[in-house]
Image (cartoon, grey):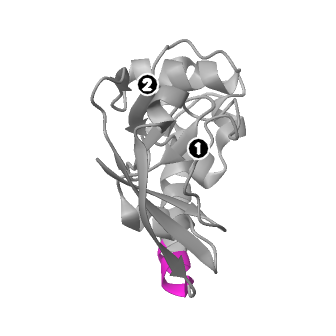
Amino acid sequence: MKLFHASSELIKQPDVFHGRKNADFGQGFYLSPDRDFVNKWAGENFYINEYKLDLEGLKVVEFERNQDWFEYIFNNRRRKDTIEADVVIGPVANDTLYDSLGIITSGYLSNEEALSLLMIGPEYRQVAIKTIKGIKQLHWVDAMKIIDVTKEKELLKKEEEQYNEDFAKAMEKFDV
């Protein structure tokens, strides 16, 4: 599996214990198979690190945008990782992309309402490598330095504006 990770430095030997414990899929090293998505989130003078992941012999859990995915993310936001896996694959929760996390996890919305808000916007895939066993099967291939991110930031701004419009329309339906 070909994967990408944006960073201000080359990362030839990633660390699964460096990331936040309350990220979507808990602590781990996060990548995406979508190079365009990674480019949008890279800063100027960042590297897009390219890797190959061999899934053979790894315990892999894969999610789609549904109730199970929502519950797993919701638990991880509270630092309660409920799944033993080397690798977790699934959609990125858009609330972390577009800064609406507080509303979704506030407790003012039902789980159904919160899940419906997480369904808004484009679906990007992420891969979290959560164990040393998993990281041993991730092989750095190459890296490309990103100098100018103007085009990507313009695309990201348009995407965020559309998300905010759709999010506001969805919120109007709720009795909060």
> To which residue does mark 1 refer?
95
Q: Position of residue 154 (x, y in %)?
A: 52, 80
Q: Which residues are magenta?
A: 149-155
Residue 17: image location, x then y, percent:
68, 34
Please identify the quadrant where the C terminus is shown: top right
Q: Name the main secondary structure of what is drawn in magenta.
A: helix
Q: Name the one closer to the observer, 150 or 31.
A: 31
Residue 120 is a magenta residue = no
Looking at the picture, how far across and down is residue 80, in whole percent?
65, 15
Secondary structure under badge 1? helix
The answer to whether 52 is drawn above or below residue 7 in the figure is above
Q: Amino acid at mark 2?
A: Trp
Front disc: 2 or 1: 2
Q: Is residue 63 left or right of residue 80?
A: left
Q: Does residue 161 show up?
A: no
Real-space CA distance between mark 2 and mark 1, rounded to the nearest whole angstrom: 14 Å
Task: Give the residue type that dot 1 points to.
Answer: Asp
Q: Nearer the viewer, residue 116 or 40?
A: 40
Q: Secondary structure at mark 2?
A: helix
Which residue position holds label 2?
69
Indicate whether 151 appears above or below 29.
Answer: below
Residue 173 lies, with reference to residue 67, above or below; the image says below
Q: Earlier in the sequence, mark 2 or mark 1?
A: 2
Question: Image check: 103 left or right of 53?
Answer: right
Image point 51% across, 18% down: which residue?
71
Identify which residue is drawn at 56% across, 42% down.
29
Residue 88 place in picture, x, y as percent: 43, 30
| Residue 82 visible | yes
The answer to which quarter of the image holds residue 91 is: top left
